[in-house]
Amino acid sequence: MKLEELKDKLATNGLARYFDKLNPLLRNTIRLYQTATDENLIEIGQTKIGGRPDLPPNISWATETNKVVTTEKSF
């Protein structure tokens, strides 16, 4: 959301008086939207959340009590 959009939304909801206090606390963010897909359709090296890591065939991934540990994110 851009700064002007925030100002407008605050004003629309009767909260414009809080903008000066909120402004110093604002930070840029990046939003990630997830889409479920078959892991075989994701190219090697492509960003993903969850699933198996992209490793060469001769390298095994860590396991915990005989279960493969999945990655949380790969950028």
Image (cartoon, rainbow, N blue to C red):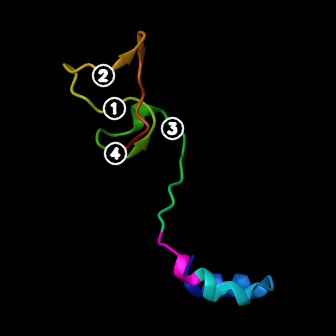
Q: Depth-wise, is mark 1 or mark 3 nearer the camera?
A: 1
Callout 1 amino acid: Pro
Instruction: Say which quarter of the image contains residue 12.
Output: bottom right
Q: Depth-wise, is mark 4 or mark 2 nearer the camera?
A: 2
Structural crowding at the residue carrying mark 2, measured as other residues with C-alpha within 10 Å and reported as few (<14), some (14–19) or many (≥20): few
Q: Are marks 1 and 2 in contact (CB under 8 Å)?
A: yes
Q: Residue at x 49, y 73 (%)?
A: 27
Q: x, y (%) of residue 30?
A: 47, 63
Q: Which residues are magenta?
A: 23-28
Q: Are marks 4 and 2 in contact (CB under 8 Å)?
A: no
- Describe the element under mark 3 as helix, strand or loop: loop
Please tell me which of labels 4 and 1 falls first in the chain: 4
Q: x, y (%) of residue 50?
A: 46, 36
Q: Are marks 4 and 3 in contact (CB under 8 Å)?
A: no
- Describe the element under mark 2 as helix, strand or loop: loop
Please tell me which of labels 4 and 2 falls first in the chain: 4
Residue placed under numbered mark 2 in the picture: 61
Structural crowding at the residue carrying mark 3, measured as other residues with C-alpha within 10 Å and reported as few (<14), some (14–19) or many (≥20): few
Q: CA distance from mark 3 to mark 2?
A: 21 Å
Residue placed under numbered mark 1 in the picture: 53
Callout 4 amino acid: Gln
Say which of 25 and 69 sits in front. Answer: 25
Residue placed under numbered mark 3 in the picture: 37
Rendered image: mark on residue 24? none
Q: Residue at x 64, y 81 (%)?
A: 6
